[in-house]
Image (spheres, rainbow, N blue to C red):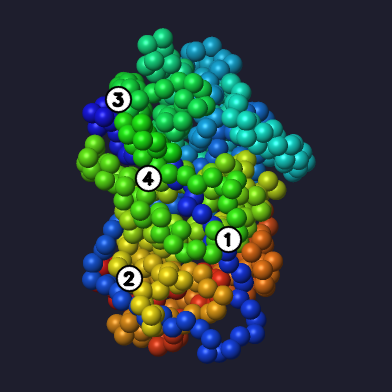
Amino acid sequence: MSGISILAFVMISILSYGYYVVASAESARDEWNFESVNLNVDLSRVLKKVNERFLSVAIDASLVAEEKFMYLLTSPKLRTLAKALTPAFLRFGGTRQDFMTFNPTFLHSNENHKNSVFDADDICERLELPPLLEKRLKQEWTLQEIILDKEDLQRKYRSVKFTECAVDLLYSFTNCSGLDLIFGLNELLRTSGNSWDSSNARTLLQYCESKQYSMSWELGNEPNSYEKKAGIRVDGYQLGQDFVQLRKILQESKLYHNTGLYGPDISQPRDHRRDLLEGYYVNGRDTSLEDFLDPEVLNTLALKTHEVMETIELTSPGKKVWLGETSSAYGGGAKGLSDTFVAGFMWLDKLGLGAKLGLDVLIRQVLFGSGTYHLVDENLDPLPDYWLSVLYKRLVGPEVLSIEAFSILGKTKRVRVYLHCTNKKSTSYKSGAVTLFALNLSKGPARISVPVTISNSTGEAFVLQSEQPGEEGLYSKSVKLNGEVLKMVDERTLPSLQGTPLPAGEHLRLPGYSFAFYVLSEAQALACR
């Protein structure tokens, strides 16, 4: 594993630890039928500090399986939605990145490269998808998803060639949206000696440098699954050597000599695969609603992450760990669940627990693309997890604070709470403000008593519930913020996402099966000043 020491980060793919059944709060409920929760907090010190791009997103490489679908990235609506998630990384990769090769249509000269397709500087204004073409591509994408899903089920992947046009479209999307691009390179291009064949990557790097595209790189996707996908085995030592080779190539570049190099992105360990770094999955195809009911499943993220952290400390001490590809379930997500309101409980808990455990970045699979775990659907409409993510970006800062929740019976399992400094960059709250976010996995409401030290703070509440009451609300693709259904004002404008005033001294009220952000603007937290 010594070859891994040159890596900037270690990425893990952990897509799911199960589901948690929830329902919207019932309208009529006994006032006294609630769980009373008390909090212990420490506002004097920062427990952990994560990357400002902690919540990041991915676009799956399956989008380039037919290059015409890359033009969906020029949709003004999709750009608007992506921009609201900044600052963030945009990882372009996934299973199909190891089956795609760069096939330039122009001669390999810098002069031709400079004149090819378009320049990024003015592309935001010049290149926008016409409404009729957007409608046609969205219709065709629905059919394309069926083909991609079949490939995933059969584990048979076509070789895909992409041109400068695809690269330009991808880079213009990230550039216009304000995202930082991480491009996944094909690791399955091997020499006869089973080392990485870097010739195609060199061609791509030369093209991107000629266009002055500022971006970072990743090599390979889940190399511990190569034997199953392609009949090729790459052990940990060889993987390290491949990364060393890529780092040397980048160091030869004037533009990329100090750029980010991320990976390896590892999942699904087996006993005979201890030579590779560890990550974990749960198959979304055999989950059930019953899985959503068990809050203990949420805690498995902590168990798995601790195991990964121990491995990193043994092999590459001090390296930061990313959750490089994560959502509700692998295999494209769980149909009827991963794109609905219920998925938000696991997503918000993963954000809270992941930061508390010291994971530096979580990359959500996907912003837009195949499967059912996307933030934006095939019609480019935002789903419940998208709105949750935008609120998290606006209200939650990178500084993690210590908090514990207790009920009369001891440490509560059904109400889960996390505490951060309030985001100083994107809000106008006072210095020392804190953001508490909470999930209620119970049918009944909860009343949260905040400590005396912050009970006199005024603030704002942002409570998210399903659009529909009862069990049907579990499957809703709409979400209410403080009672109002969230939807875009128009294709270039998001709603204001206003909170409701939170009087000083009031208990925090969390409806059954809901999650919420509470900004305590006058907490005067020493750690947040």
Q: Is residue 330 visible from the viewing direction of this image?
A: yes
Of the two numbered discs 2 and 3 in the rendering, the one whose residue sits closer to the viewer: 3
Q: Residue 274 versus residue 427: which sits nearer the camera?
A: 274
Which residue position is annotated with label 1? 290
Q: Secondary structure at mark 3?
A: helix
Upstream in sequence: badge 1 or badge 4: 1
The residue pinned by badge 2 equals 403
Dot 4 or dot 3: first in sequence order is: 3
How many numbered discs sit on the rendered protein? 4
Q: Are marks 1 and 4 in contact (CB under 8 Å)?
A: no
Q: Quadrant of the C terminus?
A: bottom left
Element on which disc 1 rests: helix
Query: For mark 3, what is the residue?
Result: 237
Residues at circles 2 and 4 in contact by the CB criterion of under 8 Å: no
Residue drawn at x 46%, y 25% is 227
Q: CA distance from mark 2 to mark 4?
A: 23 Å
Q: Is residue 197 left or right of residue 330?
A: left
Q: Quadrant of the N terminus?
A: top left
10 Å neighbourhood of mark 4: few (<14), some, or many (≥20)? many
- Expressed as whole percent of the image width and height from the top left, the position of residue 453 reads 29, 82
Q: Earlier in the sequence, mark 2 or mark 3?
A: 3
Q: Disc 3 residue type?
A: Tyr
Query: Which image quarter: residue 147?
Result: top right
Element assignment for label 2: strand
- Residue that appears at 53% across and 86% down: 33
Q: CA distance from mark 1 to mark 2?
A: 29 Å
Residue 143 figure quarter: top right
Q: Which residue is mark 4?
A: 322
Residue 245 percent across, percent down from the top left: 32, 21
Mark 1 vs mark 2: which is more N-terminal? 1
In the picture as drawn, the residue positioned furthest to the top comes out as 192
